[in-house]
Image: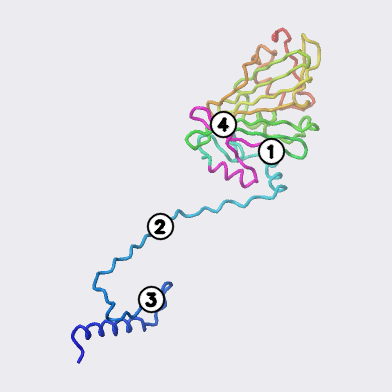
């Protein structure tokens, strides 16, 4: 006759076999092993600890455009824009756009926004983009607390670029005046060194925009009355600053009122008129 201990063990085994006969199928089914009575342990098993790891939802970035598509999209921005108003640059807005958002914007175009240097509380990120025509674009983004604070954009026009038919239309003088109105102020630098040097700086304070046009050997006329046809020359470089408190602004030049006999309204109207007539005569004595 079975002892009470053996009866208890038998009941436990029958109950276990009954549980395993269920038709439920789990992803990880437990395995039961029948242990001889001589091996039964009465110790309480250690409970299994289940750890759940919370993962942040992944964000799928925009697909990277083909190089030809990216080039066309960048060209379209530089030819005309109605939604990205200064100080916006290619959908990046100072004091609003985060660094990660900026990386995503340019990553979509196949451009790697890279860290270049850190200075104090600021980090600087940049890239260089060259078109087949020779046009070169190199913006620098000042980052503070993971937010874009301001942007400096350098443009090297293509060699064949001259006058209105350019690839950086939105930063041409006539487009800016038409888009944003008369400049807050305009300054000039003229120098008759080994190569004559011309520099014009336009400020649009209400839009946190400063732009500089630099050209060599584009000054005509005599030294006392030098002349520059503003819309019919090829500039060697164009630089623009976007956002508040920009860094590395150009040195101050001679104000419009001293460099010419024009008012700001007259200056603006000249640049909005026929390109062939957009020529300005300067007071040579204003530039020692």
Secondary structure type for disc 3: loop
Q: Position of residue 116 (x, y in %)?
A: 59, 33
* Residue matched to label 4: 117
* Residue matched to label 1: 129
**Outermost residue toward the left?**
4
Image marks 3 and 2: residues in contact by CB distance under 8 Å: no
Image marks 1 and 3: residues in contact by CB distance under 8 Å: no
* Residue matched to label 3: 31
Tell us which disc is closer to us: 1 or 4.
4
Quarter holding the C terminus is: top right
The residue nearer to you, when weighing 113 against 226, is 113
Residue at position x 57%, y 45% from top? 104
Residue at position x 61%, y 20% from top? 185
Q: Which residues are magenta?
A: 100-129
As for residue 217 lying within the magenta part, the answer is: no
**Outermost residue toward the bottom?**
1
As for residue 115 lying within the magenta part, the answer is: yes
Quarter holding the N terminus is: bottom left
Q: Which mark is residue 242?
A: none
* Residue matched to label 2: 53
Q: Is residue 174 above or below residue 63?
A: above
Q: Which badge, 2 or 1, is on the more N-terminal residue?
A: 2
Tell us which disc is closer to us: 3 or 2.
3
Secondary structure type for disc 2: loop
Q: Which badge, 1 or 4, is on the more N-terminal residue?
A: 4
Residue at position x 62%, y 42% from top? 112
The Cα–Cα distance between marks 1 and 4, rounded to whole angstroms, is 19 Å
The quarter of the picture where residue 9 lies is bottom left
């Amino acid at each position: 006759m079975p002892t009470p201990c053996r009866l208890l063990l038998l009941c436990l085994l029958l109950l276990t076999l009954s549980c395993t006969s269920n038709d439920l199928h789990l992803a990880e089914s437990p395995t039961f092993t029948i242990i001889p009575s001589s091996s039964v342990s009465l110790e309480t098993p250690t409970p299994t600890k289940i750890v759940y790891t919370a993962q942040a939802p992944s964000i799928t970035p925009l697909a990277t455009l083909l190089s030809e598509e990216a080039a066309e999209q960048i060209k379209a921005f530089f030819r005309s824009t109605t939604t990205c108003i200064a100080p916006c640059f290619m959908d990046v807005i100072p004091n609003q756009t985060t660094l990660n958002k900026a990386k995503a914007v340019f990553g979509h175009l196949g451009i790697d926004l890279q860290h270049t240097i850190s200075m104090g509380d600021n980090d600087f990120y940049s890239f260089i983009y060259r078109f087949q025509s020779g046009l070169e674009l190199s913006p620098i983004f000042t980052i503070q607390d993971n937010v874009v604070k301001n942007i400096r954009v350098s443009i090297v026009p293509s060699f064949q670029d001259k006058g209105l038919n350019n690839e950086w239309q939105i930063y041409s003088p006539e487009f800016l005046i038409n888009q944003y109105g008369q400049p807050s102020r305009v300054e000039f630098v003229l120098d008759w060194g080994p190569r004559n040097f011309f520099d014009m700086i336009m400020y649009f304070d209400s839009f946190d925009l400063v732009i500089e046009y630099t050209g060599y050997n584009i000054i005509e006329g005599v030294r006392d009355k030098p002349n520059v046809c503003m819309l019919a020359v090829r500039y060697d470089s164009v630089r623009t600053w976007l956002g508040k408190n920009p860094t590395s602004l150009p040195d101050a030049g001679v104000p419009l009122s001293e460099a010419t006999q024009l008012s700001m309204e007259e200056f603006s109207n000249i640049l909005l008129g026929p390109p062939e007539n957009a020529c300005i005569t300067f007071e040579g004595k204003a530039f020692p």
